[in-house]
């Protein structure tokens, strides 16, 4: 009792009070410091998850745009527009939250600028009716840029988060050491020590509550982002999984005991090695980031697609000690991708089926068309011996044959363009020669209709151009032919010139007529397949509506363009623009120009040589036509109707040239050609020129001919001049007459 009344008691009480006041002040200060650290930690987590959510929404935006392009379903477009608004709002909110951090704001703005560029590309692809769905280079480039900026932001934030976690741990350790040191210095009695420890325990409970609240806020943030968190301690192999992650897999959090083996057992068998190898490479610092998609088994038994992203905490030796990351359910996104892929596969299958049909149709039409076309040519040459009625019938036959040939050629050209099988030549040619040929071809139908036909090309007459002469000729003949067809009186004017458009040099071909013109509301349809101005135009003038679409696509394949200006009742002007750049080679000196001799003059030596050809054809109509052509050329000939018969004739007599039909009974032309080549090699003979004759006109058919050993090929129906060119190319006067 004396002690309680002594000065030592009051001194002890005073010392106790002082210590309590100091301890209370110290604890309050540290509590505020912990709260500040917790707030910074929470803010960092929020920034990380919002950036990840924006990245995920950008991927969804790309998927919605591709879905709309593939299906033209307006629902996709509406969702695409709505997603843009969501992403823009998310950027604004994130910038507002980070307004006190200039560095973070600049990175977010950089990420936003790439997103704006991506939206511009996506919108332009939607607006482009002729967009190439396979060409996603610009989109992938912007995705990579967005990914790079995002990853850099996340890496810095994750590093910042790690530093805060380490700092928080250090702060706690320092607090305990300072409190113990404070108690040791004061020399307080046992009761003071106990009381101070009590205060310390209370303070720790307060800190724990703050940390719990921070974790709770983090869980809510992850829940809003649709992601679950995992934390893997590599040394102890302990794995922490957030409640949302466990529930996402369909399990009860209270009963779920996560382990590495259990989680690996939930992986799809086909994904186990992929996940294992990806994780090992990241731990060994062989990958810049951890990001992978895989399938995990739900508690109900089905598999769901998961996207996992994580970062590693490494020690001073750069060894990974912890992996912290997120899981995200992307099953719906994967289903959308699979549906889009299936739609694309079905579209490719439909396109292949259409191409096969066109190839079959080509063969079925071209084979009899060869005979019809040949008979028409023969009758035209003998027209002087017929009366007027017969001449009229012959002219009708010729016109109808040409129309049918044009129809088949248009359909095949369209098929080739759709399949990407158009092979453009890149050879120099004289523009003047091209124009002269077009004049000789198109002046006849123009004169027949009583139209004035004029071509102005003096400025480019002696220029040499590097490009595909035949395709340019095809476009111009189509444009001039349309101008003649739709013009009843007046004139057709063609102007060829060099023009500067936006500081770029172009070679322009303008075809102007005084015809019926086109309604303004129909101009958008002139380059659409199987479209004409209206039904009355189609009935009156005929046509498939493929000529202009084919010309448009060919112009684009040559890096050019085809445009139209028209007024109803006043006429139309179609202009073909081709880039010049280095394609316009040079101005040719007129003195260096040589006039080529005619084809018949070239063949005169062949006629004198009395050389012999072998015709291999099973269709009697074509045999008649080819025989007539051989007689006209001056070549002797033998006929074989099967591949087997052709081999027997070839064994008895060597021929200067073989005209080989590809499709025949008993033995086709490809097999017969291979047999001939084998016998030539066995007997050490020179290769006989073998020209394949095929009703198919697609790229793969040409390749089959060449692969079988054929020297060249020609498409049916066969034109006399084309056949002459082939014969002159491969038969030479220095060949021996007897072999």
Image (cartoon, rainbow, N blue to C red):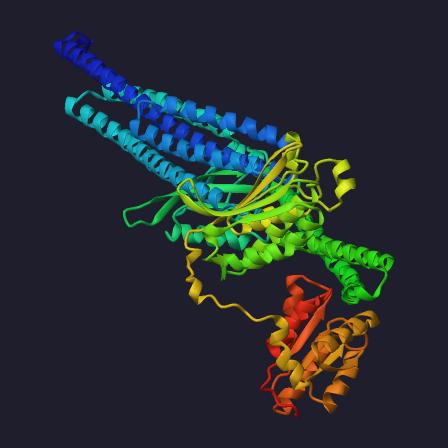
Q: Give the quarter of the image for residue 38.
A: top left
Depth check: give the residue in front, 86 or 48.
Answer: 86
Q: Give the quarter of the image for residue 503.
A: top left
In the picture, measured across the screen, residue 403 lies left or right of residue 599, that is right
Say if 187 sits above or below 493 in the image: above
Q: Give the quarter of the image for residue 5.
A: top left
Quarter containing the C terminus: bottom right
Question: Which residue is at 66% across, 45% downward?
Answer: 451
Quarter containing the N terminus: top left
Depth check: give the residue in front, 140 or 454.
Answer: 454
Residue 209 seen in this snapshot: yes
On the image, the x and y values in percent for residue 620 come to 83, 72
Depth check: give the residue in front, 229 or 99.
Answer: 99
Depth check: give the residue in front, 108 or 509.
Answer: 509
On the image, the x and y values in percent for residue 115 come to 44, 34
Q: Residue furthest left?
A: 7
Question: Which residue is at 86% across, 61% downward?
Answer: 387
On the image, the x and y values in percent for residue 667 come to 77, 77
Question: Which residue is at 50% across, 50% downward?
Answer: 457
How many labels were placed on the picture? Answer: 0
On the image, the x and y values in percent for residue 474 come to 61, 54
Q: Residue furthest top?
A: 5
């Amino acid at each position: 009792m004396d002690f309680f009344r002594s000065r030592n008691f009051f001194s002890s009480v005073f010392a106790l009070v002082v210590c309590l006041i100091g301890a209370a002040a110290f604890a309050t200060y540290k509590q505020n410091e912990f709260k500040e650290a917790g707030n910074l930690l929470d803010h960092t987590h929020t920034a990380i998850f919002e950036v990840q959510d924006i990245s995920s929404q950008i991927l969804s935006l790309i998927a919605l745009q591709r879905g709309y392009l593939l299906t033209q379903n307006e629902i996709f477009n509406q969702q695409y527009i709505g997603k843009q608004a969501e992403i823009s709002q998310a950027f604004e909110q994130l910038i507002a939250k980070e307004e006190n951090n200039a560095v973070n704001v600049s990175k977010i703005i950089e990420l936003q600028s790439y997103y704006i560029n991506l939206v511009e590309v996506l919108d332009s692809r939607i607006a482009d009716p002729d967009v190439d769905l396979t060409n996603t280079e610009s989109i992938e480039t912007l995705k990579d840029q967005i990914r790079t900026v995002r990853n850099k932001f996340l890496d810095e934030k994750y590093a910042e988060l790690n530093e805060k976690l380490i700092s928080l741990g250090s702060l706690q350790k320092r607090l305990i050491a300072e409190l113990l040191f404070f108690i040791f210095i004061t020399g307080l009695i046992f009761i003071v020590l106990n009381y101070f420890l009590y205060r310390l325990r209370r303070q720790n409970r307060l800190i724990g509550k703050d940390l719990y609240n921070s974790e709770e806020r983090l869980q809510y943030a992850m829940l809003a982002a649709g992601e679950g968190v995992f934390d893997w301690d590599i040394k102890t192999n302990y794995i922490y999984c957030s409640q949302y992650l466990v529930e996402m897999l369909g399990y009860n959090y209270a009963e779920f005991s996560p382990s590495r083996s259990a989680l690996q057992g939930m992986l799809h068998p086909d994904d186990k090695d992929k996940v294992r190898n990806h994780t090992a490479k990241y731990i060994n610092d062989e990958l810049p980031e951890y990001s992978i998609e895989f399938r995990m088994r739900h508690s109900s038994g089905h598999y769901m697609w998961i996207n996992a992203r994580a970062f590693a905490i490494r020690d001073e030796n750069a060894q990974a000690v912890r992996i912290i990351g997120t899981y995200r359910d992307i099953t719906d996104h994967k289903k959308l991708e699979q549906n889009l892929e299936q739609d694309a596969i079905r579209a490719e299958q439909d396109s292949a089926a259409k191409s096969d049909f066109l190839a079959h149709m080509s063969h079925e039409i071209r084979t009899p068309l060869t005979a019809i076309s040949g008979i028409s040519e023969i009758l035209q040459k003998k027209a002087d011996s017929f009366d007027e009625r017969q001449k009229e019938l012959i002219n009708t036959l010729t016109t109808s044959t040409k129309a049918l040939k044009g129809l088949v050629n248009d359909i095949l050209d369209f098929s080739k363009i759709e399949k990407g099988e158009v092979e453009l030549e890149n050879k120099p040619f004289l523009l003047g020669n091209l124009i002269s040929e077009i004049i000789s071809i198109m002046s006849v139908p123009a004169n027949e209709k009583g139209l004035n036909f004029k071509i102005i090309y003096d400025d480019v007459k002696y220029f040499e151009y590097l490009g595909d002469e035949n395709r340019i000729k095809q476009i111009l003949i189509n444009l001039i032919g349309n101008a003649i067809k739709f013009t009843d009186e007046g004139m057709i004017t063609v102007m060829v010139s060099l023009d500067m458009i936006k500081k770029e040099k172009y070679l322009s071909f303008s075809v102007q007529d005084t015809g019926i013109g086109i309604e303004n509301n129909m101009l958008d349809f002139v380059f659409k397949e199987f479209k004409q101005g209206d039904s009355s135009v189609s009935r009156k003038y005929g046509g498939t509506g493929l000529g202009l679409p084919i010309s448009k696509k060919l112009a684009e394949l040559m890096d050019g363009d085809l445009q139209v200006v028209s007024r109803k009742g006043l006429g139309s002007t179609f202009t073909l623009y081709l880039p010049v750049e280095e394609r316009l080679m040079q101005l040719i000196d007129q003195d260096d120009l040589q006039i080529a001799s005619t084809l018949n003059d070239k063949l005169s030596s062949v006629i004198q040589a009395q050389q012999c050809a072998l015709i291999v054809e099973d269709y009697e109509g074509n045999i008649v036509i080819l025989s007539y052509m051989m007689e006209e050329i001056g070549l002797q000939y033998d006929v074989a109707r099967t591949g087997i018969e052709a081999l027997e004739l070839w064994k008895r007599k060597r021929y200067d040239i073989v005209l080989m039909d590809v499709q025949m009974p008993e033995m086709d032309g490809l097999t017969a050609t291979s047999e001939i080549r084998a016998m030539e090699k066995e007997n050490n003979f020179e290769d006989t020129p073998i020209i394949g004759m095929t009703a198919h006109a697609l790229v793969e058919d040409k390749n089959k001919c060449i692969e079988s050993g054929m020297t060249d090929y020609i498409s049916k129906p066969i034109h006399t001049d084309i056949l002459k060119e082939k014969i002159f190319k491969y038969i030479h006067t220095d060949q021996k007459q007897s072999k």
